[in-house]
Amino acid sequence: MLAMNQGVVEEWLSEYKTLPDSAVSSYAASLKEKGSLVPALYKVIRENYSDLLEPVCHQLFEFYRSGELWLQRFVLQFLPELLWSLLLAPSAARDPHTSGCIEALLLGIYNLEIVDKDGQSKVLSFTVPSLSKPSVYHEPSHIGSLALTEGALANHGLSRVVYSGPHLQRETFTAQNRFEVLTFLLLSYNASLSYMSSSSLQSLCQLSSRVCICGFPRQHLRRYKGISSRLTVTSEFLVQLVTGIHYALCNGEMDLGSKALDDVLYRAQLELFPEALLVGNAIKSSQQCAALKSGASKEGTRIIQVEMTPTSSRISRNAVTSLSIRGHRWKRHESQEVSVDSDLAAPGGQGSSIPEISVTMPNGDSLRPRDPRPLTQPEPEPLGSASEVSPTHDLSLRGQEVRRQKSVRRLVDEGSGPASAGRAQH
């Protein structure tokens, strides 16, 4: 380790010990301004034999135990590197004393996270979103018609909540509880992803790739020469890794994130982990490479890109209501009346002329409609003279003729005799 880095770490160790309680908050906010401190601490953690590792782990635990939010976030950024050092210790022949410092730090963080301020065990709750309600990820109207079954209606509006905990206190790492503790630590890390630095996201991607490919043929493809033995993983652990990789993909770590996601899917396929395959393939299929490369930036606001669906109005303009049905009925009746009136009011009988009906009865008599014109015809007016015709009188005559012809048709269809036909004519 370089003397300059060692001097930065030693100064950091001595500085915190002399701080009064009232200055802890301002000190926590000023840590991010020390650009040389974080790389120096990474080198201390990666060293196989370092005299500074034990005091560094002790101070990191003091940071986390203080309860100051910014100090806890400062510690969490080193979590991926600490996890890799812990998993690497059995295979890399590390000094037990060195790996013991890291184990104590991780167990201390875990035991602090599973209890609240009063020392009671936490029970974490997660609300599962319902597809029938809109969210930032989807609109129900774009999914298609949902079956309105009795069970669906009974569960409509109800939220499904999944609980995790209470978790047990752990004093040592064993083969049975190792990944239970590490998975919970990654869950705490993912809860603060937006505050993690680029170096922390890179460390997470490297951790994911190394854990998944060590001891498998892909290790030669990645040209990683660290260890050659396989590391045991669980499906829940890989799911938490994929969650962090998704954030890194969308925030400037496209190359490392893509490799890490492929490596996790590679290991999940070999182990037949359905949860990790489901989450990993969903993230991979949702990535828009061109949009990510153009919009991702290592500086600025931390985001996760989501493909938004257009928001539609809650009530469609064409929704069928009682008012719309009533209005449609009125429009239909008005259109029928207007069409009848326009046919009857056509000038000169053009437009819809009333055909003359001639019916021949069984006895040979011919039944013709009466002439609607009066018996006495007025004398023809000379050419060029103006004639006045009452439109109301003309409409009433045509209406009577229509009704009379309908009655004649009805009588003929019923097969009435000549007498009834004669009465109808007179």
Image: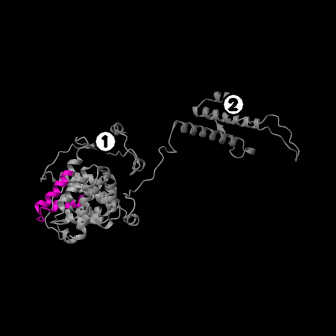
**Viewer-closest of 23 and 85:** 23
Q: Which residue is mark 2?
A: 425
The image shows residue 158 at horizontal and vertical percentages of 34, 39
The image shows residue 290 at horizontal and vertical percentages of 39, 66
Judged left or right of residue 88, residue 129 is right
- Quick check: can you spot residue 379? yes
Residues at badges 1 and 2 in contact (C-beta under 8 Å)?
no
Q: Which residue is mark 1?
A: 160
Q: Quadrant of residue 166?
A: top left
- Up the image or down, 382 lies above or below 277; here it is above
Report the residue at 22% width, 70% height from top.
Answer: 3
What amino acid type is highlighted by mark number 1?
Arg
**Viewer-closest of 306 and 352:** 306
- Up the image or down, 418 lies above or below 149; here it is above
Quadrant (top left, top right, bottom left, bottom right) of the C terminus:
top right
Q: Label 2: how many residues lie within 10 Å, few (<14), some (14-19) or many (20+)?
A: few
Give the magenta-colored segment's residue range.
79-108
